C-alpha cells in the first residue's frame, strides 16, 4: 500500500483520515511489513465502506486484509439503524457464515501415530468434499425450512450431535430472526443435497496437533494441552448461502437507485436496515447462518462416527464454532453510549473479551476462543478475545492467512501431486478430490499466517493461546 | 475468445467476440474453465436458460449465475453455449453432461459471479467484451 494513503498512529495502527464522502475514519491494524504488502485497493475499499450511510465508530481492516468485493476481506463495519444505517449483501459476501469449528478429540499424538493413514482415508470417505459432492441427507422444502430457522439446534434434535455441543457455538447454535420465506426457491433447491458437505476451494477438515501453548491458564480453560489432537472444520452455508448472496446483491443494486443510495462500488450493494429489502435480506441472511451452523454440526457428527469406528476412546467435543462472514446485531459502546448496531464482518472473526454475556459460562472469564485457520502446510492458531478488542475493533480479529498469489499463478507455479508429496514429506497427509485444487491451494499461495497472528496479538485484538500443526488435511 | 484475468483472491472471466451474444458465450466458457477443462466435457445434454435484467452488465452476471445454479442443482458441467439477447431478455441453451470425477478433473466450485470488474462494453475495434470476477 502506498504509505502516503495512511498515517501511522502506533506500531500496529494505521489511520485513513476522513476525507471526501467518508463519514468516519478508516483504521487498519497491521505491521509495517503487512501494510507494505497490502494492495492500494484495500484502502479504497475501506474508504468506500466509510462512506456508507449510518456507519459508526470506524471502517476497520484486520491484519489479514486483502482486496475483496465491496468490503475488503478482513473488513469490519457497524451500522446504526437509528442513523439510517444500511445492511449490505456485499458486506457479508456469498459464503454466508463461512466459519471455523474446532473439536477436541480426547486423543494425544501418540494415540493416532500408527493409525494416521486409516484416519485420513476414513475421514476422506465419510466427509463429502469437492465439486458436485452431495450429502446423504436429502431435504424436502419443508424440512429445509426447519434447518433455516433451527440451525445447529435442528441438527442436534435430529440426532446429529448432543445438546452440550450447542453451548460452544456462537448464538447457541441458532440465529434468531431467520425467516425462510425470504429465501428464494432457487437457494433452497441448491441446498437439497448439500447439507453435510465441505465444499471446495479453501475449505478443509484438518486433524491437528497442539504444538505450542502461549497462555497456560486460558489454554486450560479452553481444554487445550500440549500434544492434544484437535480437528478443525472450515466451511459455510454451501449453495444456499451463495444463492442468497446472488439474489440480494441484484435486488439491492436495483433498489439502491430508488432508495437514493449512491454506491461507490456495485459490490457494496446495500439497503437501509429500515426498508423492505433490508429487512428481507436480514431474515434471509440469518437463514443462511443457520444453514452453515447446521452444516458444520452434521459434519461434526460424521467425524464422530468415523473416529468412533477407528479410535473407540475418542471423545469428540466442541471447543468452539464461529462464523467469519456475517452481519450480526450487537451492543457496542459508540461515542460513550451503548448502542445496538449491525456489525458486518467480512473475513473477520468476532473476538469478544472477558465478561461478554454472549459467551458460555466456561469462557465468560477468559474471553471467546478466536479460531484462525492456516493453510494445508502451516500452523493454525487459537487466540482469545482480549479486553481491549471491544474498544479497538468492535470486538473483532483476523480470520486467516489471506492469499498472496492468484489461483492462476499458483497453478502455473505448482502441480497438485507435487504439493501433496511435499506436504507428506513434512508429515501432513493430504486427501483431496482435486489435484488441480491442491495446486491452487498450495501453502505458498497464502501469506504467512504467523505474521498475521503476531500482529493481532501485539495490537490487542486477540491474545495467542495455542498453535496447532496439521497432520491430516481433507480438501474439496 | 475467452480468458482469465488477474484477481488476487479469485479469478476474472472474460469473453471477447464480434457480437454481444458471442462475448456472453465465451465468458461462459471462461467460467467453466475455472471449474474444469471444458475440452473434457461432452456437450450431450441441453439445458435451457432464461434471465432478464435492466442493464447488460447485470444481465451478464445473471447469465453466469444461472449457469452456476444449473451446474449446482443438476451436478452437471457445460462446454457449449448458444445465447440470444433481445433487449433486457436473454435466452440460451447450455450443453454439457453429468460431472464424473473419473473423467473430469475439477478444481473448484464457483460460488457466484460478482459485480467486481463487471463490464459489458464494445471496444474501439468493434469487439464486445463481457467480463467479471467470480467468487471461488
Image (tube, rainbow, N blue to C red):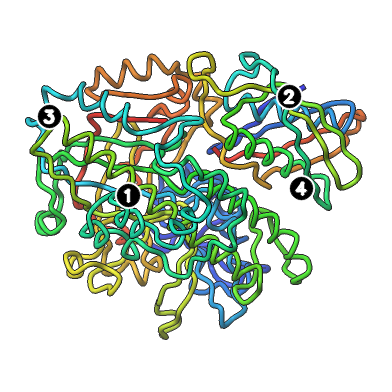
Mark 3 secondary-structure assignment: helix
Mark 1 secondary-structure assignment: helix
Q: Nearer the viewer, mark 2 or mark 3?
A: 3
Q: Residues within 10 Å of mark 4 (few under 14, many from 20)?
A: many
- Dot 3 falls on which chain? A
- Dot 2 falls on which chain? B
- Could you say which disc has been placed on residue A297 in the image? 1
Asked whether residue A202 is in view, the answer is no
Task: Tell me what residue is drawn at x 47 percent, y 44 percent.
Answer: A36
Q: Are marks 3 and 4 on the same chain?
A: no
The quadrant where residue B37 appears = top right
Mark 2 secondary-structure assignment: strand
Horizontally, residue A48 falls left or right of residue B101, namely right
Q: Which residue is mark 2?
A: B2
Q: Which residue is mark 3?
A: A112
Q: Nearer the viewer, mark 2 or mark 1?
A: 1
Task: Tell me what residue is drawn at x 24 percent, y 50 percent.
Answer: A382
Q: Nearer the viewer, mark 4 or mark 2?
A: 4
Amino acid at each position: 500500500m502506498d504509505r502516503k494513503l495512511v498515517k501511522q498512529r502506533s506500531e500496529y495502527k494505521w489511520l485513513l483520515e476522513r476525507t471526501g464522502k467518508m463519514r468516519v475514519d478508516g483504521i487498519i491494524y497491521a505491521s509495517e511489513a503487512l501494510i507494505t504488502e497490502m494492495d492500494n485497493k484495500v484502502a479504497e475499499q475501506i474508504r468506500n465502506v466509510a462512506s456508507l450511510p449510518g456507519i459508526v465508530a470506524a471502517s476497520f481492516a484486520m491484519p489479514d486484509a486483502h482486496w475483496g468485493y465491496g468490503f475488503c476481506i478482513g473488513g469490519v463495519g457497524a451500522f446504526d439503524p437509528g442513523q439510517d444505517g444500511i445492511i449490505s449483501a456485499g458486506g457479508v459476501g456469498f459464503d454466508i457464515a463461512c466459519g471455523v469449528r474446532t473439536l477436541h478429540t480426547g486423543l494425544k499424538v501418540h494415540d493416532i501415530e500408527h493409525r494416521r493413514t486409516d484416519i485420513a482415508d476414513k475421514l476422506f470417505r465419510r466427509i463429502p468434499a469437492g465439486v458436485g459432492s452431495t450429502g446423504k441427507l436429502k431435504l424436502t422444502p419443508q424440512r429445509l425450512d426447519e434447518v433455516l430457522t433451527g440451525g445447529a439446534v435442528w441438527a442436534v434434535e435430529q440426532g446429529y450431535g448432543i445438546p452440550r455441543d450447542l453451548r460452544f457455538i456462537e448464538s447457541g447454535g441458532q440465529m434468531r430472526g431467520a425467516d425462510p420465506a425470504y429465501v428464494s426457491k432457487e437457494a433452497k433447491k441448491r441446498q437439497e443435497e448439500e447439507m453435510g458437505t465441505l465444499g471446495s476451494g479453501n475449505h478443509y477438515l484438518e486433524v491437528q496437533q497442539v504444538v505450542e501453548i502461549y497462555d497456560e491458564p486460558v489454554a486450560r480453560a479452553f481444554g487445550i494441552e500440549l500434544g492434544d489432537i484437535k480437528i478443525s472444520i472450515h466451511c459455510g452455508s454451501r449453495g444456499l448461502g451463495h444463492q442468497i448472496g446472488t439474489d440480494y446483491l441484484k435486488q439491492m443494486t436495483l433498489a439502491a437507485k430508488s432508495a437514493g443510495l449512491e454506491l461507490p462500488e456495485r459490490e457494496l450493494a446495500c439497503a437501509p436496515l429500515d426498508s423492505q429489502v433490508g429487512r428481507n435480506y436480514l431474515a434471509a441472511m440469518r437463514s443462511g447462518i443457520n444453514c452453515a451452523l447446521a452444516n458444520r454440526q452434521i459434519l461434526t457428527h460424521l467425524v464422530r462416527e468415523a473416529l468412533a469406528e477407528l479410535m473407540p476412546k475418542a471423545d469428540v467435543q466442541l471447543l468452539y464454532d464461529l462464523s467469519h462472514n456475517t452481519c450480526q446485531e450487537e451492543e457496542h459502546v459508540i461515542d460513550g453510549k451503548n448502542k445496538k448496531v449491525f456489525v458486518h464482518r467480512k473475513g473477520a472473526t468476532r473476538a469478544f473479551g472477558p465478561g461478554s454475556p454472549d459467551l458460555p459460562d466456561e469462557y465468560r472469564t477468559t474471553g471467546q476462543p478466536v479460531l484462525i485457520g492456516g493453510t494445508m502446510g502451516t500452523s493454525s492458531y487459537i487466540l482469545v478475545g482480549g479486553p481491549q478488542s471491544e474498544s479497538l475493533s468492535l470486538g473483532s480479529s483476523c480470520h486467516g492467512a489471506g492469499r498472496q498469489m492468484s489461483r492462476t499463478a499458483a497453478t502455473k507455479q505448482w502441480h497438485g501431486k507435487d504439493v501433496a508429496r511435499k506436504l507428506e514429506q513434512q508429515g501432513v497427509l493430504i486427501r483431496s478430490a482435486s489435484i488441480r485444487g491442491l495446486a491452487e491451494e498450495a501453502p505458498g499461495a497464502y501469506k504467512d499466517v504467523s505474521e498475521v497472528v503476531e500482529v493481532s496479538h501485539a495490537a490487542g485484538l486477540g491474545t495467542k493461546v495455542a498453535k496447532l500443526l496439521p497432520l491430516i488435511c481433507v480438501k474439496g | 475468445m475467452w480468458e482469465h484475468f488477474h484477481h488476487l483472491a479469485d479469478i476474472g472471466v472474460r469473453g471477447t467476440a464480434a457480437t454481444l451474444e458471442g462475448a456472453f458465450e465465451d465468458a461462459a466458457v471462461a467460467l467453466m474453465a475455472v471449474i474444469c477443462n471444458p475440452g473434457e466435457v461432452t456437450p450431450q445434454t441441453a439445458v435451457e436458460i432464461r434471465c432478464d435484467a435492466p442493464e447488460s452488465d447485470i444481465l451478464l452476471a445473471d447469465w453466469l449465475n444461472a449457469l452456476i445454479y444449473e451446474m449446482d442443482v443438476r451436478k452437471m458441467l457445460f462446454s457449449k453455449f448458444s445465447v440470444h439477447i433481445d433487449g433486457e431478455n436473454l435466452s440460451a441453451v447450455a450443453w454439457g453432461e453429468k460431472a464424473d470425477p473419473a473423467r473430469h478433473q475439477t478444481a473448484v466450485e464457483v460460488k457466484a459471479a460478482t459485480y467486481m470488474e463487471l463490464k459489458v462494453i464494445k471496444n474501439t475495434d468493434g469487439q464486445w467484451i463481457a467480463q467479471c470476477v467470480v467468487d471461488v
